[in-house]
Image: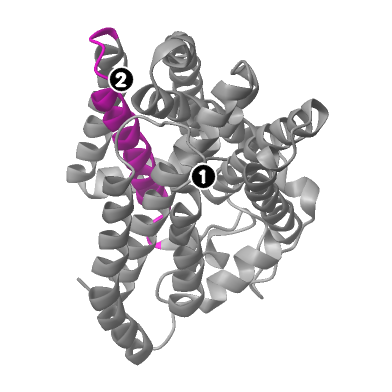
Amino acid sequence: MDLYTFWFLTLGVLLGGYAVLDGFDLGVGIVHLGIRGDTERRLAMNSIGPLWDGNEVWLVTFGGALFAAFPEAYATIFSSFYLPFMALLAALIGRAVSIEFRSKVSSAFWRRYWDFSFFLSSLVAVLLFGVAVGNIIQGIPVGADREFAGDVSDLLGIYPIGVGMLAVVMSALHGSLYLCLKTDGELQERVGRWRIPLYAGFLVGYIAISLWTLVLIPRVLDNFYRWPVAWGVVLVKMLAVVAIPIAVKANRPGWAFVGSSVTILSLIATIGLTIFPNLVVSSLSETYNMDIVSCASSLGTLGLMRTIVILGFPCVLAYTITVYWIFRGKTKLDEFSY
């Protein structure tokens, strides 16, 4: 495997890890207003309380890796999505502040305000992530100078917004499955009733977006025809999607969550296959596409960073596994809870 492909795959792993781990955090926020009572809402927040900040490390690492390995693509993407990314940053900050501030004051108004902030911040963050992904698949107006040749309105087309809405439903489903895994009693029963309707919404949206993508952007199948083994990703995705309702009906919340996680990972892999070897697809002309060779750092830099990844990634993985192991089991409230 050449260094360019190695770093493309590394970015995919980091993005996939973030989508799975912070996906359920944000999903818990999206369904938060549907949870009743102060105690149950505290339980929901505490189910992700020890984890959410560590999960965001995957996003920070993804951004750092993109900057170091493909600086020109980083510059083009961040200048293109500057305003949406500022809104995304505000949403992620709002989510964090809501979790930390909600229980600081015993006031019904105070807690309702931060409940709504938690919900809205999570919803906006996932929607913006989805809109960005929709634009990456569809292509953005980048010219020969590798500069963004449009404005914010060019990023808010019907297709990217559709992908954003699908991301919201998927995240809500992922968060609900996580809550069923981490809670019990009335809260688990209430959240459990949301899983099948959310799954149905996701399935309908996924089929619709998939067909829309094939009609709107026929090139997304090019790599699947070039490498038939890539259809294996589609097969895994289909099996994972089917496994979710089966696990729900069998009352196996752990396996349902695994099915949701594999679905998200396979979706990330599919997106990577649709754009490879490009990082930025230009909607103006294929000749303006930014591929992994033309916008990469020097081979010496890529090689040095690969060594750092080989040494450092096991530490990140070990930290993540350790935190999840320590906080395994059902969520309980104590004097240190939010």
Among all residues in the image, which is located at the extreme bottom? 300
Looking at the picture, tell me which residue is in the foreground, 327 or 122: 327
Question: Does residue 172 appear to the left or right of 235 in the view shown?
Answer: right
What secondary structure is the stretch in magenta mostly built from? Answer: helix
Closer-to-camera residue (61/25): 25
Helix, strand or loop under label 2: helix
Q: Disc 1 vs disc 2: Cβ atoms closer than 8 Å? A: no
Residue bearing the label numbered 2: 244
In this rendering, the answer to whether 229 lies above or below 109 is: below
Q: Residue furthest front?
A: 335
Dot 2: within a 10 Å radius of its alpha carbon, few (fewer than 14), some, or many (20 or more) residues?
many
CA gap, disc 1 and disc 2: 34 Å
Q: In this figure, what is the number of numbered marks?
A: 2
**Any magenta on residue 332?**
no
Furthest-right residue in view?
109
The numbered dot on residue 323 is none
Residue shown at 50% from the left, 39% from the top: 25
Disc 2 marks a residue whose amino acid type is Ile
x, y percentage for residue 66? 47, 70
Front residue of 252/267: it is 252
In the rendered structure, which segment of residues is drawn in magenta?
A: 249-277
Q: Say which element carries label 1.
A: loop
Residue at horizontal 23 percent and vertical 25 percent from the top? 239
Residue 321: percent from left, percent from top: 27, 53
Give the residue type that dot 1 points to.
Phe
Task: Specify whether 217 is left or right of 140.
Answer: left
Residue at the disc numbered 1: 336
Say which label, 1 or 2, has the lower sequence index.
2
> Is-magenta flag for residue 262?
yes
